[in-house]
Image (spheres, coloured by chain):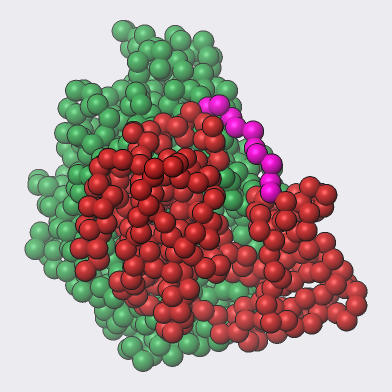
Chain colours: A red, B green
Amino acid sequence: MADDALEAFAAEVGASGPVAVEGARTRWSTGGQPAPGTRLLRAPEGIVEHRPEEMTVRVLAGTSVDELHRELGAAGQRTALPRRGGTVGGALAVGENDMCALGRGRVRDALLQVRYISAEGAVVTGGGPTVKNVTGYDLCRLFVGSLGTLGLIGEVILRTNPVPPVSRWLRAEGADPFAVLDVAFRPSAVLFDGATTWVHLEGHAADVEAERRALRGVPVGGDGWTECEDGPVLPPHRWSLRPCELRHLDGAALGAYVASVGVGTVFASHAPPPRPQAPALRALAERVKHAFDPGGRLNPGRHVALLVP
Amino acid sequence: MAWRATRRARPQPAAADPIVAALVAVLGHDRVRDDAAERSLLAHDASVFSGGAAGPVCFPTSTEEVQAVVRTAVAHGRAVVPRGAGTGLAGGAIPLGRPVVVVTTKMNRILEVDLDDRVAWVEPGVVNLDLSTYLRPLGYHFAPDPSSQQACTIGGNVANNSGGPHCLAYGVTGQHVLALDVVLPDGELVRLGGLDAEPPAYDLRGAFIGGEGTLGIATRIAVRITKNPPRVRTLLLGFDTIGDAATTVGRVIAAGVVPAAMEVMDRRITAAVEHFVHAGYPLDAGAVLLVEVDGLGEGTAVDAERVVEIGRANGATTVRVAATEEERALLWKGRKTAFGAVAQIAPSYYLQDTVVPRAALPGVLQSVYEIAERHGLMVVNVFHAGDGNLHPLLLFDSREQGAIERVHAAGREIVEVSLAAGGVLSGEHGVGVEKRDYMPLQFSDVDLDHQGRLRRAFDPACRANPGKVLPSGHSCADIQALERAAAGLWG
């Protein structure tokens, strides 16, 4: 069934003319919009096979992330894909991590096998179906965050993980988030907006309790640590910083922000500035793009950061 | 050292390689070697392959020197093969067609450790275990822990995307590298990846890792460092059959427990190891399962209990919990020295590295024993059962007529059985020359063509470690001499 769906998708993609895949448009303008005249297609949908004992799920790219997580959740598992709507293929093509990446893992580590449609309209497989695999070049990592500019993702196998038995959000005013990161062993998230610190703890009940006790060692203002339903609402833009840079954030440049401590992502109301590009790296990225899509027909108008004209 | 001085005193070959003078101009006489002994030594790695032929051997000490060596090789139209400690098991470091060999072992400094970024910058020649030893007082370690970790280098780990027992929970090297400074095959220097959360570019760092030296040479590596777990519990379960041990592994994962490590050793290897380290492994068991859970105190107790419960339900006859750190270290010493202990049984071994779905482990193991028996070979199994990564060791004596051919035939059948069970060729050792010609068993022509595109984007002139990873026809324009050398590898 999955193979038929992929072949049909490949036939739709064909071998000529500008083409892009439309998911749920939750990150549609990332890297720019497809050029006018680009044919928009939808990737096939459906969960092909969840194998809890292998910690893998095979899923077609047009499937919604919410639906995937509902299905996996019923069997006590989840993936690293971010919980913010959208499709599986879109989430991988954009490559953004969940705000609880410390606990849920990173998207780049979750993709075990990718089957994509090449610029020539062929079905290509990269990676493999097992949780451990170093056979050949790692096309999976290359595809995460490539914005559909190297191939159009049709079907993937993702690593799944058990959902921990207990999950708690705590918040406090005036707690140093770096001190929190030091005392907690494996928090799923430590978030900070300049005044409030949120901590997400997951694991066995006794371990979550132990982590809570450890947090008492961090000086806080107000009422101390209180439980809350969820983490903070995240501003729309993402800044990618080094974790150490979060000690000295520039509020004026960021606007309102929530910083993911220990990770380096800062969710901000202002967009990040463009980055300088090293010429040798840019040349390498251009060679990669040209090798996979010599005619430039895949997602024209959309560029990963290094190739912004 | 005396032995080194002795070898250096040997006369140089009469017809000196024309590139040698240019390399000497870059590195000086001390760090360019072209004598027959050195080149013969570096024609091998830890694999069973012969037929390699090294050109001049260079020992650079900086990124700039690596660039200069690579540019010199480009100017002379020569290929370049990087090499760490030479512990690779797939022949990835075996030089084919007399390339310039760039040994990174003199680039062995830990440059910087930043606890806010949870990162260590290292040179490629830093030995894997040395980094974790250095980090221990800070409460951190480098998670990938290959069995060769006392000798293998982090540059080699990057080239092979190496694993180790604890990669079950923590992932292989690719998951622990944030950024790399890479000298590309044309001598250009690029930084791939970054220390920031989501570097906005193609993940060329991810694509580079596991490239086996065919995409360039990493000269500075930023690795993620991992907090040491406050509590570690190590269990040893004995079973009557290896099938019961393998079944237990699948059931543990299915129950939602992901231990840090789950390793299986069969009866023969357990006996050999016990003779060697005296760890108290049960000698009457058909197989032993070594399980480690780590984390906070109470959670690890819950997980350990669950593992024991599942083990007993699936036929565990003995259960031992390491009571002290010394006992734990001894149990692991047994596992990590298993390959060395094999020498008690036979002079040579050939090791496969396929991965199969956990559910397929009992059946595939059964097939592995049958295949070995059919070819008149002894096989021992010691492997990363938690992630389905088999390591059958086919034991033989290479002096015996026809032995290597039988090993080759049995190895191929093991690969075929693993792939038929839904598995892959390599879990952590890489492809090198060993599995290069098996690649079409796992990938279609179109798949291999796309891997070749990535290769050529990094190395359009095909000068970086030619003849590795991709079978001829999919790799770079093949050099005639290279093909002749490759054909004799099993000799």
Q: Is the stretch drawn in magenta largely helix, strand or loop?
A: loop
Q: Where is residue B105 in the image (x, y as percent from the top left)?
A: 51, 35
> Quick check: B398 left or right of B313?
left
Residue B109 visible here: yes
The relative height of residue A28 versus residue B219 in the rendered view (above or below) is: below
Magenta includes B135?
no
Residue at the extreme right of the image, as rendered: A221
The relative height of residue A196 versus residue B197 in the rendered view (above or below) is: below
Magenta includes A273?
yes
Q: Nearer the viewer, residue A251 or B376?
A: A251
> Quick check: B277 left or right of B353?
right
Q: Where is residue B237 in the image (x, y as percent from the top left)?
A: 41, 81
- The boundaries of the magenta stretch are A271-280
Q: Which of A40 and B152 is in front in this view?
A: A40
Residue drawn at point x = 77 percent, y = 76 percent? A171
Residue B49 visible here: no
